[in-house]
């Protein structure tokens, strides 16, 4: 890291100290009992949890590039640590495994293994957050009401969440501490209504820090004035006193380095710890109000350094922790300064402030976590995920249930498996887009547009579709948009073409792949033909094609016409289908309204659909040079240009817009006929009249177009687009009474 990077980093850290310092204090107060609880649940010395908390805050906080993530003892690894200590024989041997695991994490970071975080679906991350929120609520309720339970239950959220639930309820009801309940109600009330009280002016004191200080003060007042509400013993934070600095540390037993079990647990800690870190990091980034992204590979390196150091000094495994991180964000943290402060305060408290810290009621801390849990388990988010459909909601819900009933990692894996199932199911059912053209003809043309990649998973759907197509039909398989097709699929097409299609009088062809249907391992697609135009060989058939496309649009059954694999020069080789004349007021995309491909339509825009000599010449060029075979003049309802022109006449009868001049000259419209009541009606009538006027103008002013139209080589018609329904009403093609004898 050069000098410039250091300066940038420094500025980022100290940019918002008024927010970061209080947030760091709050995280410290929450992290302190959690460090102790996880150490106890892991079967390790209590001081090991605090060592990990200090290293997680100071070392990893300094090395990490995350702004809001907070690292500390890993609850997800508590069961692994408990078993490892027992099987390895001593805590010192376990420390060796932890140190090696940290080195493996560093290697994973340099090998860019952090990219796995990018493949975690958003619904799984949201499920993780919601589950953590519920866990916080379940685990902190006993502390909020003063139920006397041991510290190991404080963060042991990875298991037994619902075990003995009925007993837990009875225990809570029978052993509520009135003082804890009072503190919890006051604390929650202050934090909920903080922004609606004068307390919000206390910039240096976020509500979470304020309630902790208030909790200590009120409990001391209870001791003097209301003794029955006074909290002591298990209702307060309890950290051990350290007599000598050297007594903090325990060092690994390097003599066990040849022990195979040491290496087994080293890899276990590295893999599980890395996955847990990446999951929590992704979840933390989603909670960040600024939506900043943390580099996962750098985070693995930072975690690896932290675990190597904690293994050398006598700690327990460290990961990024969503509980601390969410509290950090909720407390208003803007940078990693809050993380560093939390680590610094942990160090100071262990060495010098144990007596003061031990005055904090657990009920105050529990209130903070209850509110964090409630916000993480947002009912709005749950409702939002439900409305996204089962492919999104079910993995989300399964992740929540899986985490609550098992642990974080297993729950995420189960949820991810469900998500993969829906992905495969979607791929299984959507190997192609299908459309039927010329449905009025006796011989239907059925077009199957293959997806970008067609794998063996698509075999059942493709076989079912092909073998159920009607006899005597024309079938076109369009592979021009596919980058890869599995050889098994090629074999299906080959068998179908050679046998079934012949026996059932099916005209079968494939675009973009060649007729030899090569089944080589790597399919090289021929992209000479990108769209079958043989059926669109007359103006009437083109008009039918556009009508069918608009029907698909209004029915919500659009056929994808993707051209990402098509080169630009290919557009020049294929003639456009039609020239589209529409008003500049109409901004709706014509390709979408008629479900056509790129380059199928030549758009010409003109105010009010009124043509002039130059635009008619442009239409001639489009038909003579570009070979367009249909001229379509399309108007739209609720035409703001025409409506605005009519409103000006009401305001000033002497004014007259050019859009109205032809209708006035032809005595179709008289300004004195206009009233406020019939304004909308006249707007629609004039729009339709302008279409016919422009159509007749083409016939009367352009000899070439008149001649080609009379011969039926070029079609001419009008249409009206209804903005409310999306439907286009097409008029019949213009039919000339006689053929012009003059050569154009």
Image (tube, rainbow, N blue to C red):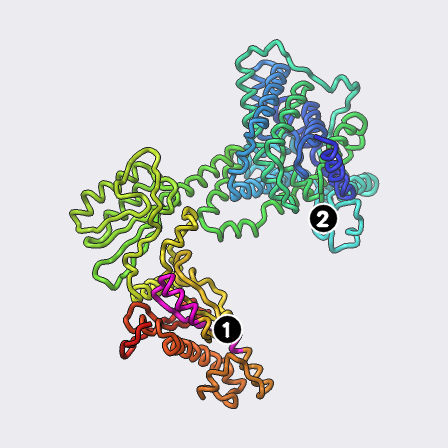
Residue found 76% across the figure and 30% down from its top = 344
Along the viewing direction, whichever of 443 and 295 lies nearer the viewer = 443
Taking the image as shown, residue 373 lies to the left or right of residue 416, namely right
* Quadrant of the frame with the N terminus: top right
Magenta stretch: includes residue 347:
no
Along the viewing direction, whichever of 516 and 307 lies nearer the viewer = 516
Res 53 quadrant in image? top right
Label 2 vs label 1, nearer the camera: 1
* Quadrant of the frame with the C terminus: bottom left
Residue found 47% across the figure and 86% down from its top = 665
Dot 1 lies on which element?
Answer: helix
Res 453 quadrant in image? top left
Q: Position of residue 135 (x, y in %)?
A: 59, 39
Residue 466 can be seen in this image: yes
Res 368 quadrant in image? top right
Q: Is residue 433 above or below residue 152?
A: below
Q: Position of residue 51 (x, y in %)?
A: 70, 24
Query: Which residue reaches farthest left?
Result: 503
**CA distance for labels 2 and 1:** 60 Å
Query: Which residue reaches farthest front?
Result: 743
Which residue is denoted by mark 1 in the rendering?
A: 607
Q: Position of residue 539 (x, y in %)?
A: 31, 66
Q: Which residues are magenta?
A: 616-643
Which residue is denoted by mark 2 in the rendering?
A: 191
Q: Position of residue 189 (x, y in %)?
A: 71, 50
């Amino acid at each position: 890291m050069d000098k410039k990077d250091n300066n940038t980093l420094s500025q980022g850290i100290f940019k918002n100290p008024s927010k970061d310092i209080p947030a760091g204090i709050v995280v410290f107060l929450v992290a302190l009992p959690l460090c102790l609880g996880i150490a106890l649940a892991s079967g390790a010395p209590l001081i090991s949890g605090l060592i990990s908390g200090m290293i997680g805050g100071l070392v990893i906080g300094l090395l990490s590039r995350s702004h809001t993530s907070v690292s500390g003892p890993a609850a997800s690894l508590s069961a692994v640590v408990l078993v490892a200590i027992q099987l390895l024989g001593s805590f010192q041997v376990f420390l060796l495994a932890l140190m090696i695991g940290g080195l493996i994490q560093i290697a994973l970071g340099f090998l860019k293994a952090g990219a796995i975080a990018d493949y975690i679906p958003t619904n799984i991350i949201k499920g993780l957050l919601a589950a953590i929120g519920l866990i916080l609520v379940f685990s902190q309720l006993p502390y909020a009401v003063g139920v006397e339970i041991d510290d190991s239950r404080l963060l042991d959220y990875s298991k037994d969440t619902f075990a003995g639930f009925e007993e837990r309820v009875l225990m809570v009801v029978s052993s509520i501490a009135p003082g804890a309940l009072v503190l919890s109600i006051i604390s929650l009330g202050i934090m909920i209504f903080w922004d609606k009280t004068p307390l919000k002016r206390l910039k240096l004191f976020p509500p979470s820090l304020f309630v902790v200080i208030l909790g200590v003060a009120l409990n001391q007042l209870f001791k003097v004035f209301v003794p029955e509400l006074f909290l002591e013993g298990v209702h307060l934070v309890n950290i051990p006193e350290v007599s000598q600095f050297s007594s903090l540390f325990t060092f690994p037993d390097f003599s066990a380095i040849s022990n195979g079990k040491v290496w087994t647990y080293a890899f276990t800690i590295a893999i599980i710890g890395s996955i847990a870190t990446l999951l929590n990091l992704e979840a933390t980034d989603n909670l960040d109000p600024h939506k900043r992204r943390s580099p996962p590979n750098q985070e693995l390196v930072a975690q690896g350094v932290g675990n190597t150091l904690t293994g050398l000094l006598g700690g327990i495994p460290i990961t990024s922790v969503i509980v601390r991180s969410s509290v950090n964000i909720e407390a208003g943290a803007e940078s990693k300064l809050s993380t560093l402060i939390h680590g610094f305060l942990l160090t100071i408290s262990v060495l010098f402030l144990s007596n003061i810290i031990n005055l904090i009621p657990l009920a105050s801390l529990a209130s903070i976590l209850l509110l964090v849990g409630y916000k993480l388990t947002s009912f709005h988010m749950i409702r939002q995920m439900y409305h996204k459909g089962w492919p999104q909601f079910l993995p989300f819900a399964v992740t929540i249930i899986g985490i609550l009933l098992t642990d974080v990692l297993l729950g995420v894996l189960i949820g991810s498996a469900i998500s993969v199932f829906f992905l495969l199911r979607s791929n299984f059912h959507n190997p192609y887009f299908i459309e039927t053209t010329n449905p009025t003809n006796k011989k239907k043309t059925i077009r199957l547009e293959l997806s970008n990649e067609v794998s063996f998973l698509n075999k059942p759907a493709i076989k079912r579709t092909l073998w159920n197509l009607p006899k005597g039909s024309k079938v076109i398989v369009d592979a021009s948009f596919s980058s890869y097709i599995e050889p098994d699929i090629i074999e299906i097409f080959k068998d179908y073409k050679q046998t079934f299609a012949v026996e059932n009088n099916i005209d079968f062809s494939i675009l973009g792949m060649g007729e030899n249907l090569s089944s080589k391992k790597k399919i090289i697609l021929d992209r000479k033909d990108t769209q079958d135009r043989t059926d669109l060989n007359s103006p009437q058939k083109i008009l039918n094609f556009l009508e069918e496309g608009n029907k698909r649009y209004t029915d919500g059954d659009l056929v994808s016409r993707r051209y990402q694999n098509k080169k630009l020069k290919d557009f020049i080789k294929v003639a456009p289908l039609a020239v589209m004349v529409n008003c500049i007021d109409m901004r709706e995309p014509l390709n979408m309204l008629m479900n056509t491909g790129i380059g199928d339509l030549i758009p010409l825009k003109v105010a009010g659909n009124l043509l002039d000599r130059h635009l008619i010449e442009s239409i001639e060029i489009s038909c003579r040079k570009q070979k367009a075979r249909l001229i379509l003049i399309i108007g739209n309802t609720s035409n703001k240009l025409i409506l605005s022109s009519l409103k000006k006449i009401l305001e000033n009868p002497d004014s007259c817009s050019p859009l109205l001049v032809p209708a006035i000259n032809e005595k179709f419209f008289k300004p004195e006929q206009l009233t406020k009541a019939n304004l909308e009606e006249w707007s629609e009538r004039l729009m339709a009249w302008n279409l016919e006027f422009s159509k007749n103008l083409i016939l009367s002013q352009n000899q070439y177009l008149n001649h080609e139209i009379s011969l039926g080589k070029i079609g001419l018609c009008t249409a009206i687009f209804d903005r409310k329904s999306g439907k286009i009403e097409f008029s019949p093609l213009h039919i000339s009474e006689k053929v012009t004898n003059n050569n154009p």
